[in-house]
Amino acid sequence: MKNSYKNAPPFVQEIVDHIIDVEGGYVDNMDDSGGATKYGVTEKVARANGYKGHMSELPITFAQDLYVTEYYFTPKFNLVAEVSETLAKEMMDSGVNVGYRNPIKWLQFLLNVSNCKQKYYKDIEVDGYLGSKSIGAYTALCKRRGELEAERYIFNGLNSFQQVYYVELAERREKDETFVYGQIVNRVEYLPF
């Protein structure tokens, strides 16, 4: 994990910097199910990755390296980046906030309902894991719809799922109403066609 930020592609460093900027510094809000966080890194995640100090003292370099390792390479968003850096950045940003398997499932759902009853490509398993079948389906969609249109379509679809995720979370757990407005304003974005 050490130096993964320093060795990451510039666009990955850019999204990590954005995430840290949006998440801010140390927070210990009783309404936050993640508990104490710094730079958006929860205590549970920090501990699982070897951090032993107080969360208020978590070094920014730890957070940077963690984001690259655990939220870019572990979910294989680097495979998405080979076909669309825009989607890789979006999926990584979403994954940090909602768990990285969710944006992968959202991508897979969108691909399956966009294949015209399997005329364009076969359905793929919605399992939250990235591999050649998901990337192949996206590439086939790009060939059918055009790269820019397919990218915008998937990008907007991912953000639609993310917005619904936040609303449903706040509906289930009233304490999440504390965060839903900021999550939608700061994390959900749509591209024009």
Image (spheres, rainbow, N blue to C red):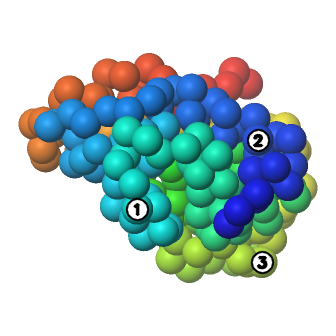
Residue drawn at the location 69% of the way across and 21% of the way down: 192
Return the residue nearer the eye: 117 or 11.
Answer: 11
Closest to the camera, between mark 1 and mark 3, is 1
Q: Which one is earlier in the sequence, the residue at label 1 or at label 3?
A: 1
Q: Amino acid at mark 2?
A: Gln
According to the image, label 2 marks what residue?
13
Are dots 3 and 2 in contact, CB under 8 Å? no
- Label 3 and label 2: CA atoms lie apart by 25 Å
Image quadrant in which the C terminus is located: top right
Quarter of the figure with residue 43: bottom left
Q: Amino acid at mark 3?
A: Ser
Return the residue nearer the eye: 113 or 47.
Answer: 47
According to the image, label 1 marks what residue?
52
Residue 162 placement (x, y as % from top left)? 44, 42
| Left or right side of 110 for 32 | left
Residue drawn at the location 86% of the way across and 41% of the way down: 10
Label 3: few (<14), some (14–19) or many (≥20) C-alpha neighbours in 10 Å: few
According to the image, label 3 marks what residue?
132
Residue drawn at the location 48% of the way across and 37% of the way down: 39
Residue drawn at the location 77% of the way across and 78% of the way down: 132
Label 1: few (<14), some (14–19) or many (≥20) C-alpha neighbours in 10 Å: few
Residue 184 placement (x, y as % from top left)? 41, 26
Label 2: few (<14), some (14–19) or many (≥20) C-alpha neighbours in 10 Å: some
Is disc 3 placed on a helix, strand or loop? helix
Closest to the camera, between mark 3 and mark 2, is 2
| Left or right side of 109 for 37 | left
